[in-house]
Image: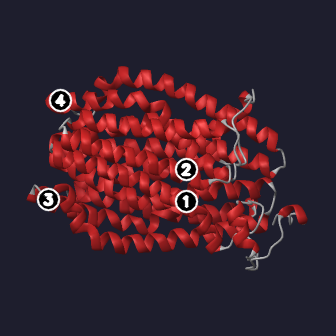
């Protein structure tokens, strides 16, 4: 067995990982994110086909607010994993575990507070989003039930990132499979058989999220063979503040996506009506499966970059970045081809009962899927600078990519091109974001050791402990 293959099996972050080994390391996280998205798609399918267009529109209208509340889990997971992996790279495993425990405790406490706030604000927020009558009541019902599992959902996202940092990415995959299967079975029973509509869909999601958040909490609290274990937390407000600042990019990205969804829904309600919101919901559900590839890859590869950054190994940082950019670019091209081939059958699955909605959904998805080609570069750029400890730049990049470019495009293009301009907005925004990332890597690369000579491809590079790290530059 080669050293590279062995390094993947043991999850030794100090060893060199070529493109194939990097893919093997990240595949569990990619699969985990894809499965999470697939289960969400199944949830939408049951609501759309068993509860009707109004119920489906209600779930999609209130979902951005729910996701905004969930974003703290993204922040704590991404910012926390960067701190923990960097601390391990510096050789202090005990402090890394105490940081890990502190971050999980803080995430749980914040989740409880946000769940209460979310339940109180659900109705006024739904009204502000344009809901009224039956649509309003369905939004409030789904949203308030979802608050039951909000703390667990936030923990689930944090643990998904920490599973890779702990050297056990397959743990996150197993938990996701268990939670997703529970969601599918309960959707079938509560929505499909008992006809409980959005109420049944909400409770199915609650049970799945409780499994997804509490199962890893119990696992990490017990003796385990991973690199991390919950125990006595650090009392370091400065470190926690650093985690929040560094992870703010992922939080900003998630908030921005939700804000963009809100703007899209408002524009669609104005220009097309309820069918526009339903079509956009279908596009979002389906596109989540495709973009999950990028999200899973970035989630798993970020701790590797943070470790090498803590170890001051510029050669490996350059190798990781180059391999990662190749992976996301090739994946984007493949997803574009697949999405064009599957546009019709995927639209049929959600909107086959309504010919007008079917035609609208298919056209929207064909246009939207053009964004897959540049999307991976923009997502990886934000993840890269978070892993390098520059949360401010990463947050700014995420804000520009979504709040700046996407919101700007969705407001400016429809007056010029009509409703079609809405669907092209994300294509324009993602292309511009990829160009910005390329410029940032070129301009700031020397500062972080990302620009320099190409490291030789080898499968037998010794671990960092066996040789001094090369100098930066």
Q: Nearer the viewer, mark 3 or mark 1?
A: 1
Q: Nearer the viewer, mark 4 or mark 3?
A: 3
Residue 26 x %, y % = 58, 62
Labels 4 & 1 near each other (Cβ < 8 A): no
Q: Which residue is mark 2?
A: 172
Question: Residue drawn 14% across and 28% down?
Answer: 133
Residue 77's disc is: none
Residue 323 x %, y % = 63, 71
Labels 2 & 4 near each other (Cβ < 8 A): no
Residue 132's disc is: 4
Left or right for 343, reference 153: left
Q: Between marks 4 and 3, how big is the CA–CA gap?
A: 26 Å
Q: Which residue is mark 1?
A: 28
Q: Earlier in the sequence, mark 4 or mark 3?
A: 4
Seen from the viewer's position, the closer of residues 264 and 118 is 118
Quick one: quadrant of the N terminus? bottom right
Residue 334 x %, y % = 42, 74
Q: Between marks 3 and 2, how big is the CA–CA gap?
A: 34 Å
Seen from the viewer's position, the closer of residues 472 and 234 is 234
In this view of the protein, can residue 379 be seen by the observer?
A: no
Labels 2 & 1 near each other (Cβ < 8 A): yes
For the residue carrying disc 3, how many other residues have a C-alpha within 10 Å: few (<14), some (14-19), or many (20+)? some
Q: Nearer the viewer, mark 4 or mark 1?
A: 1
Q: Earlier in the sequence, mark 4 or mark 1?
A: 1
Q: Between marks 3 and 1, how big is the CA–CA gap?
A: 33 Å
What secondary structure is found at the residue carrying circle 1?
helix
Left or right for 259, reference 449: left
């Amino acid at each position: 067995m080669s050293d590279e293959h062995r390094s993947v099996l043991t999850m030794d972050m100090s060893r060199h990982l070529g493109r194939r080994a990097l893919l093997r390391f990240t595949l569990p996280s990619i699969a985990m994110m894809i499965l999470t998205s697939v289960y969400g798609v199944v949830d939408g399918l049951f609501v759309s086909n068993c509860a009707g267009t109004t119920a489906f529109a209600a779930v999609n209208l209130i979902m951005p607010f729910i996701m905004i509340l969930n974003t703290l889990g993204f922040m704590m997971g991404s910012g926390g994993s960067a701190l923990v992996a960097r601390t391990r790279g510096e050789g202090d495993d005990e402090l890394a575990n105490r940081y890990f425990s502190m971050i999980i405790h803080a995430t749980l406490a914040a989740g409880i507070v946000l769940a209460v706030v979310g339940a109180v604000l659900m109705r006024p927020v739904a009204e502000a989003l344009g809901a009224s009558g039956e649509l309003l009541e369905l939004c409030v019902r789904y949203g308030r039930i979802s608050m039951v599992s909000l703390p667990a959902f936030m923990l689930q996202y944090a643990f998904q990132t920490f599973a890779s940092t702990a050297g056990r990415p397959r743990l996150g995959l197993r938990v996701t499979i268990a939670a997703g299967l529970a969601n599918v079975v309960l959707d079938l029973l509560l929505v499909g058989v008992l006809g409980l509509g959005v109420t049944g869909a909400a409770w199915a999601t609650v049970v799945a999220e409780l499994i997804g958040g509490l199962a890893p909490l119990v696992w990490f609290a017990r003796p385990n063979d991973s690199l991390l274990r919950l125990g006595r937390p650090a009392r370091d407000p400065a470190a926690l503040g650093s985690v929040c600042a560094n992870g703010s990019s992922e939080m900003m990205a998630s908030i921005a996506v939700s804000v963009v969804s809100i703007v899209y829904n408002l524009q669609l309600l104005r220009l097309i009506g309820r069918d526009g919101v339903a079509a956009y919901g279908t596009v979002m559900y389906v596109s989540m499966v495709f973009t999950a590839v990028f999200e899973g890859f970035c989630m798993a590869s970020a701790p590797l970059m943070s470790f090498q950054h803590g170890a001051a190994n510029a050669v490996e940082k350059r190798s990781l970045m180059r391999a990662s950019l190749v992976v996301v670019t090739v994946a984007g091209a493949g997803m574009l081809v697949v999405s064009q081939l599957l546009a019709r059958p995927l639209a049929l699955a959600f909107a086959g009962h309504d010919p007008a909605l079917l035609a609208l959904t298919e056209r929207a998805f064909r246009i939207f899927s053009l964004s897959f080609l540049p999307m991976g570069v923009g997502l990886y750029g934000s993840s890269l600078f978070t892993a390098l400890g520059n949360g401010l730049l990463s947050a700014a990049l995420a804000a520009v990519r979504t709040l700046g470019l996407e919101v700007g495009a969705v407001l400016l293009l429809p007056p010029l091109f009509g409703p079609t301009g809405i669907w092209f907005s994300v294509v324009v925004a993602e292309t511009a974001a990829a160009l910005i990332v390329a410029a940032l890597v070129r301009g700031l690369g020397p500062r972080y050791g990302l620009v320099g000579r190409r490291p030789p491809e080898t499968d037998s590079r010794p671990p960092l402990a066996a040789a001094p790290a090369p100098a930066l530059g």
